[in-house]
Structure formats: structure tokens, C-alpha cells
Image: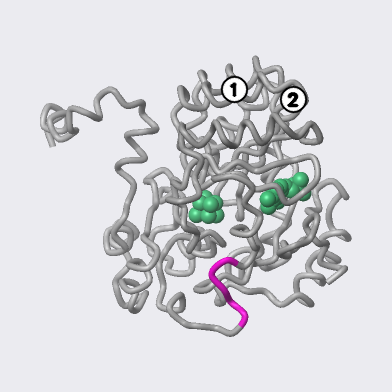
């Protein structure tokens, strides 16, 4: 296509958006489009439509480009492709497996653990992970929109035991630099807060999101800033992601990773070794490896506890201690994540 025609295709209201925002609005949302891009046929995945109607498909091109063409078992593809197994109803798999709805202190604020609160800054994500425990979460009522921030902020202001605020979602980095700037500035005005943590999958899903403006704002914050990224597989970390992580590191931001243990995706010893090594190579330390939350529609990703424990034992033999993540489960009502060996 001629370049001029390409320019015409972009609606006027998007021209002022930054590159990552344009990439986000052009994410793949049709399962058939994703299959076509990967040279796969609809026979490789049966009845994906019903699953994508329940929880829509969303994959930015930057992420799709890391999926191997022609491979229906690709570990990145399986994280994002809607599948018929999601429609199975399995005993023990619920809509709110981690009890988020009962931990609500004010709209969009979860205070489950001492000293830290989790702020649901937005319901949106850049990618829809099929195993996500928030796949049924009523985001519309829960997200702390600008009006609701006031309520969450006054809750934090009134409890001096809170030292750390965790920006979560959804994915907090889908918010614009400007909105994040506003929120961080409001948080910095609360004297007893010392740490800011950002939980985001964007560094490995849409690396262009790590803008210089964002990095500079975090680098100049009075907070000690930590970012917990969410990579499940070494293939998610290509040179573009490494570059984004390097920028964050240069801004003095502590980088950690949390992953979810997923059957057929990262449940082999080699997958886990490769992930830890790729992370460290990119300046990130493994933090948590989560056992799957029993959310309705994700049972096909479950790895048995005994197998998960064996995997960690093996990892301890093969890797330095600092590259072995803590295997945990989140249990509703508990005061912290529960180590798997206590289950
Ligand atoms: C996981 C989680 C945290 C953070 O727990 P850490 O062990 O500090 O990483 C905080 N609040 C909520 C509601 C959580 O689910
Ligand atoms: S980015 Fe995180 S919150 Fe969003 S769908 Fe994936 S796992 Fe869930």
C-alpha cells in the first residue's frame, strides 16, 4: 500500500496518540485474525468463538510477533488464544477465587495484607491472558476512576500503617503518562508512604509503553520504586523487551517478575530455567511463581501441586538461589500469599 493511503487509514483522533497507544488500539481482537497471522487454520483450535465471546481475545502485534508461525502449541499463543476448554465447568473453579470482592475497602482499593494496599487503577489490560483470575471481575464497578481516587486516597491518608501502594488493575501502565503523573503526585503527598510498586505485563507485551517520560517520572519520584513485571516464558523477552527493561533499570527501578505456573506453557524444568536466566539477563529477579488461581474457565492450565513442588526442588538443584522463584498460592482470607510447601 502507498504510504499516503496508510496515513489516511488512521482516524484523526488517533493521530495525537503516542505510538504505544496506537499499537494498543490496533491490537488483534478476532481469534480468526490471530490464526491467519500465524498461518494456522481454524481446525487447529475448535470452537474458540464461544470462549472469546465470554472473555474477549486481545493481543497486540508486538506480542504476536514473538509467537512462532505455524505452531499451534506455541507457549505464547496458548496464553492468549481462546479455546473451547474454557467453556467447561469444573468443580472447585469459581468466579472470584481469591476473594477480591470481600477485601474491598473503598472502590478500587484492596487492603488484604499489612502495610500495603493494592489500587485497581483501571480495568483495562493490553492483553487478555486466558488463565487470568480477573477474567470475571466486575471491573466497571471496581476501578478507581478519577473521582474514586479521592476516596481511596483518603483511606490511605487515614491509615499510617500503610507504607506501600501497589498500582494494579487490569494493568496500570495502560493509563497515559499524564494520568499516572497525577496519581503518583497525589500519592507522594501522603507522608507515611515510602514505596511505590507497579504490577504490569506491559514491559513484555508492549515494550514501547516504557516511554522516557514514564521512566523519568519514576526515577524522579521520592518513592523507592519497584516494578513487578509478569513474564511466563523466556520467549516473551526478546531484544525489544530487554531494551525497555534496561531503561527502567537505568531509572533506578527495582525489577522483579511474577509468573503463573501453566500446564503446557512453562511447566517443564527447562522452561523454568530458561525463564529465570532470561529474566536475570534482562536485569529482573524472579519473585513469585503462582499456582493457578482456580478461576472458572482456566482448569485446563492447572499443574498438580505435587508436580509443582517437584519442579521447584529440581530448580533449587540447578539454579543459584536468587533465580528460584517462591512458589505460592493466593488463598482468600489469608494475611499473605501462602508458600506451596505449607499447603
Ligand atoms: C499479592 C497482593 C499483594 C502483594 O503481596 P506481596 O507478598 O507483598 O507481593 C498486596 N495486596 C493484595 C490484595 C495482593 O493480592
Ligand atoms: S495482564 Fe494481568 S490482569 Fe490483565 S489479563 Fe493478563 S494476567 Fe490478567
Which residue shows up at 66% across the image and 39% down it?
166
Residue 189 visible in image: yes
The mark found on residue 224 in the picture is: 2
Which is in the foreground here, disc 1 or disc 2?
A: 1
Residue at point 54%, 61% (across, down)? 132
- SS label for mark 2: strand
Q: Is mark 1 within 8 Å of ligand 1?
A: no
Q: Give the image's coloring scheme.
A: one colour
Q: Provide the residue span drawn in magenta.
A: 92-96
Whether 5 is drawn above or below 233: the answer is: above
Front in this rendered view, residue 99 or 29? 99
**Direction from residue 272 to residue 202 in the image, left or right:** left
Q: Position of residue 317 (x, y in %)?
A: 88, 60
Q: Which residue is mark 1?
A: 186
Count residues near mark 2 (Cα–Cα under 10 Å), then give few for <14, some for 14-19, many for 20+. Answer: some
Q: Determine the residue positioned at 29% across, 59% down.
A: 30
Residue 90 picture location, percent across and down: 55, 83
Q: Main secondary structure of the magenta part?
A: loop
Q: Is 207 within the magenta?
A: no
**Relative height, residue 284 to residue 66 (above, below):** above
Quarter of the image where the C terminus is located: bottom right
Asked if labels 2 and 1 touch by Cβ distance under 8 angstroms, the answer is no
* Residue 1 on image: x %, y %: 13, 37
Amino acid at each position: 500500500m502507498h504510504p499516503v493511503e496508510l496515513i489516511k487509514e488512521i482516524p484523526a483522533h488517533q493521530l495525537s496518540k503516542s505510538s504505544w497507544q496506537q499499537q494498543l488500539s490496533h491490537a488483534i481482537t478476532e481469534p480468526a485474525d490471530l490464526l491467519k497471522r500465524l498461518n494456522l487454520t481454524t481446525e487447529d483450535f475448535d470452537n474458540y468463538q464461544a470462549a472469546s465471546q465470554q472473555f474477549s481475545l486481545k493481543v497486540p502485534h508486538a506480542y504476536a510477533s514473538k509467537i512462532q508461525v505455524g505452531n499451534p502449541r506455541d507457549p505464547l499463543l496458548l496464553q492468549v488464544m481462546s479455546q473451547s476448554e474454557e467453556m467447561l465447568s469444573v468443580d472447585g473453579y469459581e468466579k472470584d477465587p481469591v476473594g477480591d470482592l470481600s477485601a474491598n475497602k473503598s472502590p478500587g482499593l484492596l487492603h488484604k495484607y499489612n502495610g500495603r494496599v493494592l489500587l485497581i487503577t483501571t480495568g483495562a489490560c493490553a492483553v487478555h491472558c486466558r488463565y487470568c483470575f480477573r477474567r470475571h471481575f466486575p471491573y466497571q464497578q471496581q476501578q478507581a476512576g478519577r473521582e474514586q481516587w479521592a476516596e481511596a486516597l483518603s483511606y490511605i491518608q487515614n491509615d499510617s500503617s500503610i507504607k506501600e501502594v501497589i498500582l494494579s488493575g487490569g494493568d496500570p501502565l495502560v493509563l497515559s503518562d499524564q494520568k499516572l503523573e497525577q496519581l503518583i503526585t497525589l500519592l507522594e503527598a501522603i507522608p507515611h508512604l515510602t514505596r511505590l510498586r507497579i504490577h504490569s505485563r506491559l514491559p513484555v507485551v508492549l515494550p514501547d509503553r516504557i516511554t522516557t517520560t514514564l521512566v523519568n517520572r519514576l526515577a524522579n519520584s521520592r518513592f523507592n520504586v519497584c516494578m513487578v513485571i509478569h513474564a511466563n516464558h523466556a520467549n516473551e523477552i526478546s531484544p525489544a523487551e530487554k531494551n525497555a527493561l534496561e531503561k527502567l533499570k537505568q531509572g533506578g527501578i527495582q525489577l522483579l517478575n511474577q509468573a503463573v505456573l501453566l500446564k503446557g506453557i512453562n511447566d517443564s524444568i527447562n522452561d523454568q530455567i530458561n525463564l529465570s536466566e532470561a529474566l536475570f539477563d534482562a536485569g529482573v529477579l524472579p519473585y513469585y511463581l503462582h499456582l493457578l488461581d482456580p478461576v472458572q474457565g482456566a482448569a485446563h492450565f492447572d499443574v498438580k501441586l505435587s508436580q509443582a513442588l517437584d519442579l521447584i526442588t529440581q530448580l533449587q538443584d540447578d539454579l543459584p538461589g536468587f533465580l528460584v522463584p517462591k512458589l505460592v498460592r493466593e488463598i482468600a482470607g489469608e494475611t499473605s500469599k501462602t508458600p506451596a510447601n505449607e499447603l
